[in-house]
Image: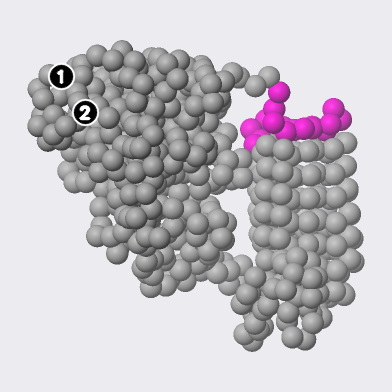
């Protein structure tokens, strides 16, 4: 069945059982009226502006209009209330609708206060009602394609995201540019990051009114080490709606101002390490084919489907609360000081009294360290200042990390390992017991050589066995396997199995940790590989 016929079918199903009312028919509400009317699910519209209500009645003959919100709540044929009013009214209107037993779709933001947002979520749960937030771009086919590509690993590890949402107008006085424009971008970034930021810094400019920001830049830092920034303005000479995602394998650009066929481009740019130096390798842009659909129609249809089936909406109240949390943190940072950046940690509901990571009482974590959620640090381990450890890591006993060392998510470091300055571990690296990193090539006790540090990079998924030694200045490739006791004196390719002193390659390893046979097909997971010279590539996962 085509999307068009599916939409019509759902629309008919809903219209034959219950309908929705759109509250607020102004700049955005009129588009909601149009879509719900086309889907056959619109019962009436509500607006205090008589001229606007009259215009709606003339445009949609047969549709009822009212200025009385209570009349909307009293109507037995209205099962869902769609709220598109000023942000400061969202909480009260949504609360009253839920108390009246109506499903609710409320435009962003969910509320202006975290406690109010949590109250709406709990109220909807108690009464078995749908609560959905209008984060439109979560229903944009192009963003959904980008989300799927990122989830499938097409971009590799995401390092950085930035978004620009700029235009000349529509200038508001009931909310600043942060609350007006940024929720869309925050929602997309949180979805791609799949984690909440550990710090938010926001700066802005107040040009048309001393209390209402016209331009803001928000900087988000995540436990995994990923960073993002959001630049929004309604004082810009041209329209720009662009999301750029920088991954280790590819870079993606979602530009919503471009024609449909050019909205999503992938750039296979990569950074290769040659002689321990990063060298950029550029590729031609790749257009990504996506079926053209109106995002708002998809969003309205999703609300109708949620009401009809009881499914949890893609942008439910909890997703709205996460976005609200980052908005509140950004606003707090703006309010604290316009001239000095100060990071503010967002909170879901109330401040957490305990960190979301564990350290044994005998462990020491110095100042200015960032530890990801779910990480565990065991007996007599020392994390030195300015180090970053991602989420879900397990750091064993008597381990030293830092200072200023970066460790990704899901890393496991066994007992008696030191990760010195100059060593970087990407995600899901395994360090066996008592294995050794060096950071100076020819150390002498009597001669200081800390200004001669050589960088060591251990790529995603690599395993280093017990008592092996990694001589500084080399890269251990993705999913490589260094055997116990080996001494690595040169770069190790991706997927390579190396043993001995000096370490030499004796075979290849699958991502799942099983040695590959001569046919380069994994006997456990079925993944197949292809050898190009001394480089191994996955051909089928």
Rendering coords of residue 406 (x, y %): 65, 48
Could you tell which of marks 2 and 1 lies nearer the N-terminus? 2
Where is residue 502 shown, x and y percent of the image?
83, 75
- What residue sits 79% from the left and 75% below the top? 523
Q: Mark 2 packing: few (<14 Cα in 10 Å), some, or many (20+)?
A: many
Q: Is residue 126 left or right of residue 400?
A: left
How far is mark 2 from mark 1, CA to CA?
9 Å
Q: Is residue 222 left or right of residue 33?
A: right
Which residue is at 35% across, 26% downward?
A: 78
Q: Which is more toward the observer, 94 or 197?
A: 94
- Front position in the image: 290 or 112: 290
From the image, give the main secondary structure of the stretch colored magenta: loop
Asked whether residue 360 is drawn in magenta, I would say yes
Q: Is residue 109 magenta?
A: no
Identify the residue under disc 2: 25
Along the viewing direction, whichever of 407 and 103 lies nearer the viewer: 103
Quarter the C terminus occupies: bottom right
Residue beneath disc 1: 49
Mark 1 residue element: loop
- Name the image colouring: one colour
2 and 1 marks in contact (CB < 8 Å): yes
Is any part of residue 454 visible from this angle?
A: no
Secondary structure at numbered mark 2:
loop
Query: Where is residue 467 shown, x and y percent of the image?
Result: 89, 60
Question: Quick one: 357 or 403, which is closer to the camera?
Answer: 357
Provide the residue span drawn in magenta: 354-370
């Amino acid at each position: 069945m085509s999307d068009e016929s599916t939409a019509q079918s759902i629309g008919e199903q809903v219209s034959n059982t219950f309908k929705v009312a759109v509250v607020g028919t102004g700049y955005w509400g009129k588009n909601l009226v149009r879509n719900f009317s086309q889907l056959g699910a619109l019962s009436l519209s509500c607006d205090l502006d008589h001229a606007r209500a009259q215009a709606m009645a003339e445009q949609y003959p047969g549709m009822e209009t009212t200025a009385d919100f209570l009349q909307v709540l009293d109507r037995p044929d209205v099962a869902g209330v769609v709220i598109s009013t000023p942000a400061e009214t969202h909480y009260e209107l949504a609360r009253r609708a839920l108390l009246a037993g109506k499903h609710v779709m409320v435009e962003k933001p969910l509320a202006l206060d975290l406690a109010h947002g949590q109250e709406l979520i709990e109220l909807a749960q108690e009464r078995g009602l749908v609560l959905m937030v209008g984060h439109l771009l979560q229903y944009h086919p192009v963003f959904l394609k980008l989300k799927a590509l990122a989830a499938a690993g097409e971009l590799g590890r995401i390092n950085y995201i930035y978004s620009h949402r700029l235009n000349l107008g529509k200038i508001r006085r009931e909310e600043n540019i942060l609350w007006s424009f940024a929720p869309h971008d925050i929602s997309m970034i949180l979805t791609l990051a799949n984690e909440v930021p550990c710090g938010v810094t926001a700066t802005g400019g107040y040009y048309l009114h001393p209390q209402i920001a016209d331009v803001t830049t928000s900087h988000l830092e995540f436990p995994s080490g990923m960073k993002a920034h959001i630049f929004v303005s309604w004082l810009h000479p041209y329209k720009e709606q662009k999301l750029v995602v920088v991954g280790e394998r590819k870079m993606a650009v979602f530009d919503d101002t471009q024609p449909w066929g050019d909205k999503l481009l992938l750039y296979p740019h990569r950074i290769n390490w040659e002689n321990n130096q990063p060298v950029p390798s550029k590729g031609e842009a790749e257009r990504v084919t996506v079926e053209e659909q109106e995002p708002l129609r998809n969003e309205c249809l999703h609300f109708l489907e949620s009401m009809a089936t009881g499914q949890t909406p893609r942008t439910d109240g909890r997703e709205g609360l996460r976005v609200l949390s980052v908005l509140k943190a950004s606003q707090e940072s703006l309010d604290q000081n316009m001239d000095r950046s100060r990071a503010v940690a967002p909170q879901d509901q109330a401040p957490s009294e305990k960190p979301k990571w564990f350290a044994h009482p005998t462990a020491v974590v110095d100042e200015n360290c960032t530890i990801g959620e779910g990480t565990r640090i065991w007996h007599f381990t020392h994390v030195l200042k300015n180090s970053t450890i991602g989420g879900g890591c397990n750091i064993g006993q008597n381990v030293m990390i830092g200072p200023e060392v970066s460790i990704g998510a899901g890393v496991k470091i066994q007992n008696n390992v030191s990760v010195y300055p100059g060593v970087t571990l990407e995600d899901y690296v395994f360090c066996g017991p008592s294995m050794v990193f060096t950071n100076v090539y020819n150390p002498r006790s009597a001669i200081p050589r800390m200004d001669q540090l050589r960088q060591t990079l251990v790529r995603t998924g690599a395993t280093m066995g017990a008592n092996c030694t990694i001589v500084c200045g080399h890269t251990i490739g993705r999913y490589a396997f260094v055997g116990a006791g080996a001494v690595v004196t040169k770069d190790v390719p991706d997927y390579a199995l190396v043993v001995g002193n000096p370490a030499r390659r004796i075979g290849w390893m699958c991502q799942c940790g099983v040695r590959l046979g001569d046919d380069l097909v994994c006997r456990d997971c079925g993944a197949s590989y292809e050898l190009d010279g001394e480089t191994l590539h996955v051909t089928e996962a």
